[in-house]
Image (cartoon, grey):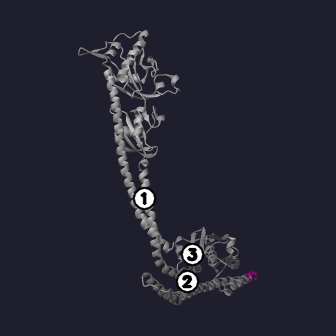
Amino acid sequence: MRLKNKLILSYIILITLPLVTLGTGSFYASKNMMLKLARDNVTEIVQKNNQVIDERLKIIQDNSLSLMVECDLFQIFDDAAPAHSELLATNKQVTEILNRYFSQSRDLYSVELVTRAFVYGSKARNTYPSDHFYDSELYRQAAEQKGRMAWVPTYDYSLMHQLPDLAGADIEYRYLFSAVRQMNPSCVRNDAIVRARAGSEKPVLVMNFRDGLYADLFRNSIPIEGAVFLVAGADGTIISHSNAEFVGRKPSFPWMAEVQNRGSGASFVMVDGKRTIACYTTSALTGWTSVVLIPPGALTKDIGQTITFFILTLGASLLLLSLLFAYLISMRITSPVRKLLLAIKRVGGGDFNAKIKVEGKDELGHVLMKFNSMNEKVKQLIDENYVAKLRERETEILALGIQLNPHFLYNTLNIINWMAVYGEKEQVSRMLVSLSRMLHYTTDNRKDSMPLSEDIGWLQDYIVIMSNRFEHRFRVDFDIEPELMKARVPKLFLQPLVENAIIHGFRDMESGGLITIYGRSLGNDIEFCVEDNGCGFEPERLKEALAENSSHIGINNVDKRIKLLYGDRYGIGIESVPELGTRVKLVIAHQKS
């Protein structure tokens, strides 16, 4: 990235980073404040709604208590049970009494007074036979309370009253919740309470409600988008819900137990894997819990949009100003820097005469002056030092090559001498021809590196000589990738490794010696391996083989040459196991001819 672009980017970062930090902090502070206010307000609404419903239900409950001392009702149920022919007339009387107490309530769906013989009340909303009632949960709870009010959570009307014909019917009273009380009619006469005779039947008052009692109030009082309200009984039965499909069911809400245990308040709960605010309160009258669930995102949506708009508008304005400001400043800075870069490129290309015209006297001008001065000194150092070092390196490589050739000649001529002593004329002739080619290769070509194919040809001549000398006690196999034959390698670099394998590795072997020479490409490097099945040597001699004063002149020589030509990370590595053999690995850089 250019310096001008870096300066512009720096200005952008310096403007946007504080803006984003402040904006993010303001957003989350406002969000938390909004969440707290909304949570407190919704909790207060839930508590007030619950209080309003409790008051309305309390009035109905008090009316049911007043009904217990209604003299007209006492008179009806204190006498003997009405005959079948009198049931309709009696029902009319009971219905009028019930209307007198409960007709003013908009919350009641229906009121019934149930005996074993008859269900008294409006028949438009009472369709079940009385004998089924005494097998129902309604009667069981009324009997358990013994005259106290029992609140029964929402149920399926057809299942509660064993009406299979209504199971699939579309009826408005499909789901109801009820308040039931077992009545013990009495009457106040002459300031004394007269109770029904012992053994007289105790009718059960059943007051039915629809979930709209809760739904209408909560739906209109919680105007938050995405909010969900529900009312649940102690056993988890849903009395009312924003989604009518849940009414009368017992869905598995893991958070419900926590909410019911706390009673009233607000907290965060996990609903369908999402963090949600739950505002809740428990009715002192019914023991049911009213809950409103609010997704936090619905509360912060508006403020988030406002803050985002503010940040983007302010940020865009500041960015435009910073871009203009950065451009003007960068032009004054980058112009001398560009001149310096051009001069450095020329120097990198070998032109050490490059100079920069200095126009200013500020810090950048001082840098340009120092660059010109440095360039002059570098040019002098190259003339005085660099060329001398190159010559020293070439001299050292040449000296190592000279050291190798006499060493090889000494060993080879000694072998031919012994063969001449034993009168092996034809073998001596072949060996002299091979030696002649080898000497031509080493003396006529002064280059330090050669194509691998030529060096392998020279090595094969050497192997012919050594094979005759040792009466074919060993053989040499080559396994070299064909594409490596054109690569340039140090001259005679494999010969000392093969010589060591023959002289030292097979010194105690009469036959069966095997030398395998591998060559393979490793990316930008080449790995050669000379492996023999000779006698090997002990681990403590491994370090001695490459030491400065090692007796293994050839190996030490090759290792030095490779490091001088390619660098210190290249060279020779030796592995040896006594009685099994030795493996010498040699790594060089891949240089094509």
From which residue to which does the magenta span run? 426-430
Q: Amino acid at mark 3?
A: Tyr
Residue 157, percent from left and from top: 46, 25
Residue at horizontal 48 percent and vertical 28 percent from the top: 172
Question: Which of the 4 image quadrants contains residue 513?
Answer: bottom right
Residue 30 among magenta residues: no
Disc 3 to disc 1, C-alpha distance: 63 Å
Indicate which label's residue lies in the foreground, 2 or 1: 1
Question: Which of the 4 image quadrants contains residue 151?
Answer: top left
Q: Amino acid at mark 2?
A: Arg
Whichever of callouts 2 and 1 sits on the residue coming sooner in the sequence is: 1
Q: Identify the residue position indicated by label 2 in the image.
A: 346
Callout 2 touching callout 1 (CB < 8 Å): no
Kindly identify which numbered label has been placed on residue 310.
1
Disc 2 to disc 1, C-alpha distance: 51 Å
Q: Residues within 10 Å of mark 2 (few under 14, many from 20)?
A: some
